[in-house]
Amino acid sequence: MEATGKKVVLLLGLMAVIAWCTDAQTICNAPISGLVACRPAMTPPNPPPPVAVCCDALRHANLKCLCQYKNSSLAPQLHVSPKLALELPKKCKLPHPAPC
């Protein structure tokens, strides 16, 4: 029983470290988890409005830095529209548009 308890504690600790590392990763000062939350709002044909987590990530992002991904070959593979992505700052009511 004692060995099982130690395994559970070790597993929970490992899960916490993985979650912390995932949240700590950023692209252009925006947390990756926040940018992932933006994906539905960038997916045609009828995207939903961006969620709060997405908009919060964009508030912290270096939008000029994100512009370098505008013509990425990954966008079509991820079913993401660069045009819809460029509309997100406005939809999130950010004070400045993406400077692309």
Image: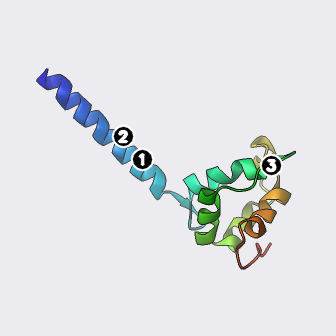
Taking 34 as reference, is 81 left or right?
right
Residue 52 x %, y %:
62, 59
In this rendered view, identify the residue nearer to me: 70 or 35.
Answer: 35
Colouring scheme, one of rainbow, by chain, secondary structure, one colour = rainbow
Q: Earlier in the sequence, mark 3 or mark 2?
A: 2
Residue 37 bears which disc, if any? none
Please, what secondary structure does the residue beneath circle 1 have? helix
Q: Residue at x 80, y 49 (%)?
A: 47
- Marks 3 and 2, how far apart at CA: 32 Å
Crowd around label 3: few <14 · some 14–19 · many ≥20 (10 Å): few
Q: Nearer the viewer, mark 3 or mark 1?
A: 3
Quick one: quadrant of the C terminus? bottom right
Q: Report the amino acid beneath label 2.
A: Met
- Give the secondary structure at mark 2: helix
Which three-letter amino acid code belongs to the residue tagged 3?
Pro
Q: Residue at x 23, y 29 (%)?
A: 7
- Marks 3 & 2, CB-CB < 8 Å contact: no
- Residue 67 position, x and y percent, is 74, 67
Query: Which of the 4 image quadrants contains residue 79?
Result: top right
Quadrant where the image shows the N terminus: top left
Residue at 85% x, 59% y is: 83
Q: Which residue is mark 2?
A: 15
Position of 14 relative to 91 (above/below)? above
* Amino acid type for the residue under numbered disc 1: Ala
Secondary structure of residue under mark 3: loop
- x, y (%) of residue 42? 77, 52
User: In the drawing, what numbered circle is on residue 47?
Assistant: 3
Using the image, tell me which numbered label, if any, was put on residue 19.
1
Query: Residue 78 appears at what percent x and percent y?
Result: 74, 43
Q: Earlier in the sequence, mark 3 or mark 1?
A: 1
